[in-house]
């Protein structure tokens, strides 16, 4: 007997990085299949166009696209907010197809209070002045995640817990901690000055929910985290925000979607894009 889907007013997902080895698409698919959202905000870096490689596009990555297309086909409002890894889509800002829309930001009212949604790369100095360095860092991060998966596999074989190498790096480097703190402070200051009760970001892969007061006012800062390490999302339902954490959701861990093997990867880019075109043709018809 299938578990009934949870109804959620709004879901915010960011930093999925489809098309990279670090992406946990199967876990995300389980989550998406477990909920029935009224609105979905994809808050940037959903498809990693920076690192897109036609030789690596597993079945589970395509299943995410198809599931989102299915939601759109059923009338679920889906906003795709552009990020830095999918910045190419900024050329198409304003594009609408049914209930789907590509935007740079979203401002909406939630129970009478204004919420501001954007990816957050506009605050990243590296992105503004040294994009090549940011892209190099992205490749290094993805490599670290692959190594981390092997380390965790060995660790679990010996009965030890999982570890996060990137988190250890972030927590051990003062400049990384300062960057995160500055990011959260800057976003919150701007939100307060504009009268936003909520500011919702992604980009830094650091899930968070906290109230920030700068003396001029206060706002609730929220970050949806990512589907590389943290496997988190934000949910807004009945006037309450919740930070969803996949690893703590025991209700869906045993309900696996189809498992895939390396041989099932979609290696032909023509097949990938033909499938995408087919999905959107169905939406448009």
Image: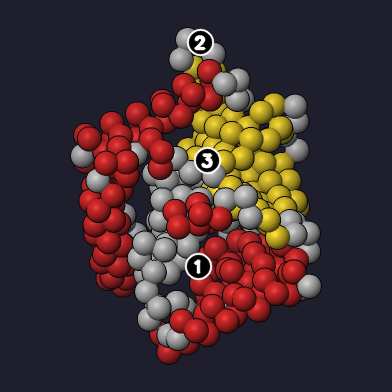
Q: In the image, residue 238 lies at what x, y percent? A: 75, 38
Q: What is the residue that sits farthest to the top in this orientation?
A: 215
Of tags 2 and 1, the one toward the viewer is: 2
Residue 262: which quarter of the image?
bottom left
Q: Mark 1 sits on what residue?
A: 25
Q: In the image, residue 265 lies at what x, y percent? A: 45, 83
Numbered badge on residue 118: 3
Q: In the image, residue 76 lies at what x, y percent? A: 75, 56
10 Å crowding of disc 2: few (<14), some (14-19), many (20+): few
Q: Residue at position x 28%, y 56% from top?
A: 135
Q: What is the residue that sits farthest to the front in this orientation?
A: 91
Front position in the image: 123 or 199 = 123
- Cα distance between the residues tagged 1 and 3: 22 Å
Q: Mark 2 sits on what residue?
A: 216
Q: Residue at position x 71%, y 33% from top?
A: 110
- Cα distance between the residues tagged 2 and 1: 41 Å
Find numbered disc 3 in the image and state the secondary structure of the residue it sits on. Answer: strand
Q: Is residue 5 left or right of residue 143?
A: right
Q: Is residue 230 left or right of residue 93?
A: left
The reply to whether callout 2 and callout 1 are in contact (CB within 8 Å) is: no
Query: Which quarter of the rendered picture does the C terminus lie within?
Result: bottom right
Front position in the image: 231 or 175 = 175
- Cα distance between the residues tagged 3 and 2: 22 Å
Q: Earlier in the sequence, mark 1 or mark 3?
A: 1
**How many numbered marks, from 0 up?**
3
Q: Residue at position x 72%, y 53% from top?
A: 77
């Amino acid at each position: 007997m299938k578990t009934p889907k949870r109804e959620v007013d709004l879901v915010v997902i960011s930093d999925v990085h489809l098309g990279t080895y670090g992406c946990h698409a199967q876990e995300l698919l389980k989550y998406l299949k477990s909920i029935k959202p009224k609105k979905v905000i994809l808050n940037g870096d959903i498809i990693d166009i920076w690192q897109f490689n036609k030789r690596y596009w597993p079945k589970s990555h395509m299943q995410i696209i198809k599931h989102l297309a299915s939601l759109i086909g059923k009338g679920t409002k889906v906003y795709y907010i552009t990020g830095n890894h999918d910045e190419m889509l900024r050329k198409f800002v304003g594009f609408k197809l049914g209930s789907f829309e590509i935007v740079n930001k979203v401002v909406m009212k939630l129970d009478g209070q204004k919420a501001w949604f954007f990816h957050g790369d506009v605050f990243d100095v590296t992105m503004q002045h040294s994009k090549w360095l940011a892209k190099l860092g992205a490749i290094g991060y993805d490599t670290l995640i692959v190594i981390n998966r092997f380390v965790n596999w060995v660790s679990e074989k010996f009965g030890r817990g999982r570890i996060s190498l990137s988190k250890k790096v972030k927590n051990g480097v003062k400049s990384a901690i300062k960057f995160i703190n500055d990011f959260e402070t800057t976003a919150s200051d701007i939100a307060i000055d504009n009268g936003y009760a909520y500011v919702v970001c992604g980009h830094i892969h650091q899930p968070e929910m906290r109230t920030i007061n700068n003396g001029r006012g206060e706002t609730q800062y929220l970050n949806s985290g990512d589907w590389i390490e943290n496997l988190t999302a934000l949910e807004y339902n009945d006037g309450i925000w919740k930070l969803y954490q996949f690893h703590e959701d025991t209700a869906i861990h045993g309900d696996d979607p189809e498992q895939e093997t390396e041989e099932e990867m979609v290696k032909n880019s023509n097949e990938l894009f033909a499938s995408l075109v087919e999905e959107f043709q169905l939406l448009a018809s």
